[in-house]
Image (cartoon, grey):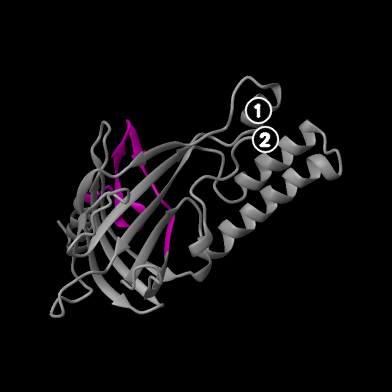
């Protein structure tokens, strides 16, 4: 066997272990494989004026589109403009659904897709504890303030955004909605951090559904606009 053949076999074996996942992150939730195309994040630091408690939030987005920092806001703007044309210009249902499908097709394709939002709180932590550390799972709805860095997360599965899905909304027979899954355990790890620039995060959260959750590591660039992103969009007329 040649040296090149040996390297090829090693590469194929490695891919079989990691499934050659985009971003190095994947898994299975609710019987569906998790796949993402890009990752981005934003962070917010300050002091809560109501409690005088210092905070440092880091929010990672795993997205179904390339260049999501630019592409996702473009999609949101185009969808909002289409909705407004229904009232302002009496846009016909057929024309609306054609444009709605095209807006998704050019960014996400016309297959179903996943989005993920992982919310890390870097505080509180001991003075000698670095920000590049393990984050335990704590439900965002918990009233107790954790004593160490913690995280929560959400997944959303969107069905294919096709003309037929849009037409069903106009007919009143069905709504285009996302299935949501909230994390219920696991751990997140901040491996590398450059303020307002870049993060590398290892994710091992679990979700209350068949398949368990997602796992892997991703590096994301800072995107200030992600502070305003919704995980629900393009839903309902």
Q: Is residue 13 left or right of residue 227?
A: left
- Residue 24 vs 159, above or below: the answer is below
Q: Quadrant of residue 22?
A: bottom left
Residue identified by numbered label 1: 169
**Residue shown at 17% from the left, 63% from the top:** 147
Give the residues drawn in magenta, as a range. 16-40
Q: Nearer the viewer, mark 1 or mark 2?
A: 2
Quadrant of the rendering where the N terminus is positioned:
bottom left
Identify which residue, 230 or 203, lies in the foreground. 230
Q: Tag 2, which secondary structure? A: loop
Q: Tag 1, which secondary structure? A: helix
**Residue shown at 53% from the left, 60% from the top:** 228
Identify which residue, 147 or 73, lies in the foreground. 147
Residue identified by numbered label 2: 237
**Residue shown at 56% from the left, 57% from the top:** 72
Does the residue at mark 1 contact the one at mark 2 (Cβ under 8 Å)? Answer: yes
Residue 110 seen anywhere in this rendered image of the structure: yes
Q: Is residue 51 left or right of residue 71?
A: left
**Residue shown at 38% from the left, 44% from the top:** 155
Q: CA separation, marks 1 and 2? A: 7 Å
Image spot of residue 211 (x, y percent)? 25, 35
């Amino acid at each position: 066997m040649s040296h090149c053949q040996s390297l090829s076999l090693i590469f194929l074996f490695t891919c079989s272990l990691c499934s050659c996942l985009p971003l190095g992150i994947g898994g299975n939730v609710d019987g569906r494989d998790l796949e993402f195309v890009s990752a981005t994040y934003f962070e917010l630091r300050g002091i809560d004026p109501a409690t005088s408690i210092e905070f440092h939030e880091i929010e990672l987005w795993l997205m179904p589109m390339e260049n999501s920092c630019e592409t996702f806001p473009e999609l949101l703007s185009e969808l909002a403009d289409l909705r407004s044309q229904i009232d302002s210009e009496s846009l016909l249902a057929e024309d609306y659904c054609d444009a709605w499908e095209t807006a998704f097709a050019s960014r996400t394709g016309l297959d179903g897709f996943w989005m993920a939002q992982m919310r890390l709180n870097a505080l509180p932590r001991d003075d000698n504890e670095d920000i590049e550390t393990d984050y335990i799972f704590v439900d965002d709805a918990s009233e107790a303030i954790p004593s160490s860095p913690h995280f929560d997360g959400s997944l959303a599965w969107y069905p294919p955004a096709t003309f037929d899905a849009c037409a069903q909304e106009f007919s009143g027979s069905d709504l285009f909605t996302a299935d949501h899954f909230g994390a219920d355990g696991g751990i997140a790890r901040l491996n590398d951090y450059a303020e307002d620039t870049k993060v590398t995060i290892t994710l091992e959260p679990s979700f209350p559904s068949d398949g368990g959750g997602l796992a892997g590591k991703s590096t994301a660039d800072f995107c200030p606009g992600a502070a305003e992103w919704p995980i629900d969009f393009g839903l309902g007329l």
